[in-house]
């Protein structure tokens, strides 16, 4: 007899696992006539049946458990998935067991790591969350040329662990995001100029497919899937671990320089940023150049200000030569410093403090250059909306991201499913919609109006969306996300038929929608 009270929580779970008998009335899966017979299965039943199949240290959590709200935290709470049970595997080998159990019981499943996936397409999910947060091992290989990362690692630990051992690799730039999530769709970060996207560094993936089988994906094993995992991977499998290239760190510190400017500098700043980006030829060591336009009431009560931060892999003297044009633009205030790589996240506002959850309305585009006329219009729209909706103005921000892109652009675009190597900037607007307010529509309209302006600002180009920044907004076409060349989506759809014919992976920016 299983007592509910002792089943919750990772720590107590071991006792349960050792007890391990199947509930008396459970029919072993190999005796079941058809796997799809149990649509009404209860969550406590799932816990009773699945628990004994998993390795010690695994956890199964129900909404009544005290850990529930922490476990289900996600960055964007606007349209969250409907999670009925959380299963936390202790070992990679638990993942196929969970997937098969879900298949046998007509349950949907969704892999989650750090919960920063923000597309509203996740909102149609209802079922079992496979939470990979216990799978965090990082193993540097003896060659010093690669490391194996489990599917639940987070950028923060990846950056710190490698740095401590004298290495770096490509990660997202915010320390709160996972590594695999970003990697499956791209993975833009500070080492992109040197080493490309995170996905450009993948050597091997251990993948659990929709039918619960476990396969190796690399140049000699399921090579067709390797292509798809590099850019559309969320649609194909669960990565329990993968092998990435790593590199000697070469330097001791990164230099940062941050500036606050008033709005009248917008044209000058963006003009200099375009010169610096130089159609993809920006200095490879100038890893990240981010801007935010937002209301800073200390600086102005009525007008949004500009904040820009630059980070350079190397000494201040080299960096400041590149930044001379920006030093000439009169700033309200500025600060600079030199820090070890894992600490560069803080002055650049991508540290843990920047990762707060909220119901965000977002729109996002990829750009080659900043259209300055357009940016002025978007700026004016921003101030106008802040005046109309002060509550939205509290959190609304325009984000401008410029990475060094040489490493990313050196890779043949056809060689991976990532379609947007000719884009130089990731740009978006976000505003938190206060709970219970009637500001959802104005926030969405503001996001859409900004999106329209961004696209009108590149009249000869087609709108492009980074899959990991896709919002789920109806106006984002599949082509804008997965590529306009017809062979790209054809190939992806063909691979879906082969590797996920029942379309079990269809919640994160689906290739084959419902
Ligand atoms: C604050 C913030 C900062 C960001 N910074 C960057 C950045 O610098 N660079 C960048 O490229 N992107 C960035 N992103 C976007 C980021 O790439 C995506 O949000 C990504 O999905 C986050 O991964 P996660 O593990 O944190 O989120 P999750 O929500 O846990 O995962 C997102 C999706 O990935 C899939 N998934 C996760 N883990 C696995 C796995 N092991 N196997 C298979 N599928 C899996 C699931 O479908 C899941 O729905 C940022 C997002 C936010 C919110
Ligand atoms: C690819 O996977 C196969 C099967 O697991 C393995 O034997 C081979 O060593 C792998 N190749 C690489 C480059 O990792
Ligand atoms: C506003 O600007 C001041 C002065 O430059 C800065 O110190 C502060 O952190 C900013 N506040 C916010 C909320 O960004
Ligand atoms: C910039 O945007 C405007 C519309 O805002 C457009 O008319 C113009 O052609 C764009 N410039 C370039 C170089 O694309």
Image: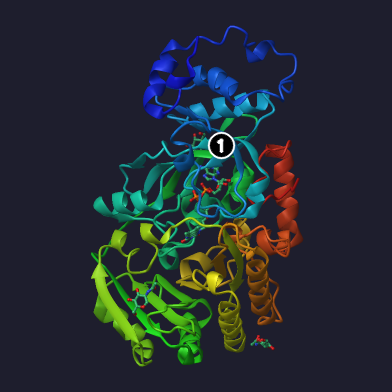
**One can see residue 99 in this view:** yes
- Towards the viewer: 474 or 66: 66
Residue 314, percent from left and from top: 28, 71
* Quarter residue 332 falls in: bottom left
Residue under the point 66% across and 70% down: 442
- Towards the viewer: 176 or 462: 176
Q: Quadrant of ligand 4?
A: bottom right
Classify the position of the C terminus by image quarter: top right
Residue 256, percent from left and from top: 31, 74
Residue 501, percent from left and from top: 73, 37
Vertically, is 189 above or below 292? above
Residue under the point 38% across and 90% down: 325
Residue under the point 47% across and 38% down: 132
Residue under the point 51% across and 19% down: 53
Give the residue furthest to the top: 24
- Towards the viewer: 256 or 74: 74
The residue beneath circle 1 is 129
């Amino acid at each position: 007899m299983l007592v509910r009270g002792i089943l919750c929580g990772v720590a107590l779970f071991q006792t349960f696992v050792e007890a391990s008998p199947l509930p008396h009335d459970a029919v072993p899966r190999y005796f079941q006539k058809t796997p799809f017979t149990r649509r009404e299965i209860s969550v406590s039943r799932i816990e009773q049946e699945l628990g004994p199949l998993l390795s010690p240290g695994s956890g199964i959590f129900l909404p009544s458990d005290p850990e529930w709200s922490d476990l289900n935290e996600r960055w964007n709470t606007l349209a969250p998935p409907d999670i009925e049970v959380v299963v936390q595997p202790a070992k990679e080998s638990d993942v196929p067991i969970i997937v098969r159990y879900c298949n046998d019981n007509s349950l949907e499943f969704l892999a989650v790591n750090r919960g920063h996936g923000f597309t509203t397409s996740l909102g149609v999910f209802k079922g079992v969350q496979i939470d990979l947060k216990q799978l965090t091992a990082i193993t540097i290989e003896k060659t010093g040329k690669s490391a194996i990362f489990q599917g639940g690692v987070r950028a923060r630990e990846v950056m710190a662990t490698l740095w401590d051992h004298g290495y770096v690799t490509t990660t997202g730039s915010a320390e709160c995001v996972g590594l695999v999530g970003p990697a499956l769709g791209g993975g833009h970060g500070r080492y992109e100029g040197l080493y490309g996207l995170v996905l450009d560094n993948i050597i091997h993936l251990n993948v659990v497919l929709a039918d619960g089988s476990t396969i190796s994906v690399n140049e000699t094993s399921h090579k067709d899937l390797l292509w798809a995992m590099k850019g559309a991977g969320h649609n194909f499998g669960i990565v329990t671990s993968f092998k990435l290239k790593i590199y000697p760190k070469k330097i001791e510190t990164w230099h940062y320089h941050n500036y606050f400017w008033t709005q009248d500098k917008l044209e000058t700043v963006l003009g200099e940023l375009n010169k610096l980006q130089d159609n993809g030829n920006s200095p490879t060591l100038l890893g990240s150049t981010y801007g935010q336009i937002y209301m800073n009431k200390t600086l102005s009560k009525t007008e949004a200000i500009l904040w820009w931060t630059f980070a350079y892999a190397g000494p201040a003297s080299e960096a400041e030569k590149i930044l001379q044009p920006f030093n000439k633009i009169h700033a309200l205030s500025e600060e600079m410093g030199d820090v070890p790589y894992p600490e560069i996240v803080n002055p650049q506002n991508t540290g843990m403090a920047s990762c707060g959850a909220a119901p965000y309305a977002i729109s996002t585009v990829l750009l080659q250059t900043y259209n300055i006329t357009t940016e002025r219009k978007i700026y004016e729209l921003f101030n106008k909306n802040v005046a109309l909706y002060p509550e939205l103005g509290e959190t609304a921000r325009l984000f401008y991201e410029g990475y060094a892109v040489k490493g990313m652009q050196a890779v043949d675009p056809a060689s991976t499913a990532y379609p947007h190597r000719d884009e130089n900037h990731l740009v978006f607007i976000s505003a938190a919609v206060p709970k219970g307010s009637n500001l959802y529509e104005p926030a969405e309209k503001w996001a859409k109006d900004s999106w329209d302006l961004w696209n009108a600002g590149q009249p000869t180009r087609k709108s492009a969306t980074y899959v990991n920044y896709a919002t789920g907004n109806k106006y984002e076409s599949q082509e804008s996300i997965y590529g306009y060349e017809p062979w790209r989506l054809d190939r992806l759809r063909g691979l879906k038929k082969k590797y996920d014919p029942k379309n079990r992976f269809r919640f994160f920016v689906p290739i084959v929608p419902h």
